[in-house]
Image (cartoon, rainbow, N blue to C red):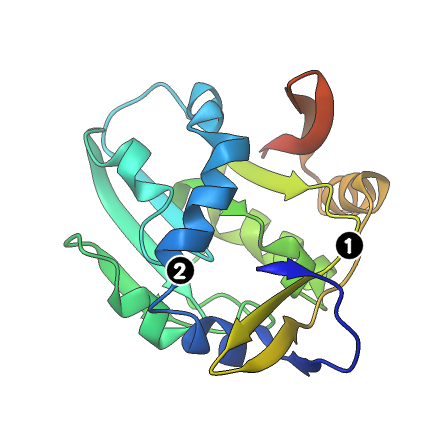
Amino acid sequence: MGYDKKHTKVLDSQTWYNILHEQYKTYRKHLDSFENGYFTRFIPRKDKLHILDIGAGDWRLFRFLKDHNYERYVAFDIAEKLLKNHPWKVEKIVWDAEKDLPFKDNSFDLAMSFFVLEHINNLKNLFYETYRILKPWATRIVGHFLQRREYTHMYKWDYFKVEQYKYTIDDIEDLANDAFFTTHIHNVYEWKVHLWYIISLEK
């Protein structure tokens, strides 16, 4: 994994993550170095939660929640090969988050997405749809990394980049507020360097 090589192919996120599904564990360690379960302090303090993990990947967030007394856990991702690597017995749904979410109103207590928003073009619709499917007083947790340069990845001697949309924290806050969420932004530091945000949203 490296940064910004010229003349690299730009792939959509579905193609990108399906290509990398066998190597994702290595990339996951990179993401964990920033996160490491910090988000769990914002999870609703109740049992039998109904949880939606948007951009669930292979199981990176679930390992922090697998011992929680949840009633329903939906692992939701656009990359079917990556989702198949999820080793736990949870609901697995392959779906494009650009589309309306395939759930009824007021279905979940918690919706999460970490390092996902940069892959979504119609982000406004995703916020509105997430608000719709959350129960009253439910929580939405977003992890957003301050990635100033795009990653490139070599696979079979060819270089690829994934298509991304560069949202600022102000963009995300405005979209969340427009979708009627109450928004709280938490700065996260590593070695005194501001690297990313956790945004906790309340319906």
Task: Tell me the amino acid under the disc marked 2.
Answer: Tyr
Residue 144 in sight in this render? yes
> Which residue is tagged 1?
149
> What residue lies at 35% left-to-right and 68% top-to-bottom?
82
Q: Vertical placement of 85 versus 171: above or below?
A: below
Residue 106 in sight in this render? no
Q: Residue furthest left?
A: 89
Report the Cα–Cα distance between label 1 and label 2.
Answer: 20 Å
Q: Residues within 10 Å of mark 2 (few under 14, many from 20)?
A: some
Q: Residue furthest front?
A: 157
> Which residue is tagged 2?
24
**23 or 156: nearer the eye?**
156
For residue 11, which quarter of the picture?
A: bottom right
> What residue lies at 62% left-to-right and 31% top-to-bottom?
198
Task: Tell me the amino acid under the disc marked 1.
Answer: Arg
Q: Is residue 48 left or right of residue 105?
A: left
Q: Vertical placement of 63 versus 91: above or below?
A: above
Q: Is residue 68 left or right of residue 21?
A: left
For residue 25, which quarter of the picture?
A: bottom left
Q: Residues within 10 Å of mark 1 (few under 14, many from 20)?
A: few
**195 or 4: nearer the eye?**
4
Label pair 1/2, CB-CB below 8 angstroms = no
Image position, residue 45 (x, y; %): 36, 18
> What residue lies at 33% left-to-right and 69% top-to-bottom?
22
> What residue lies at 71% left-to-right and 47% top-to-bottom?
179
Image position, residue 186 (x, y; %): 67, 22
Q: Quadrant of the N terminus?
A: bottom right
Q: Secondary structure at mark 1?
A: loop
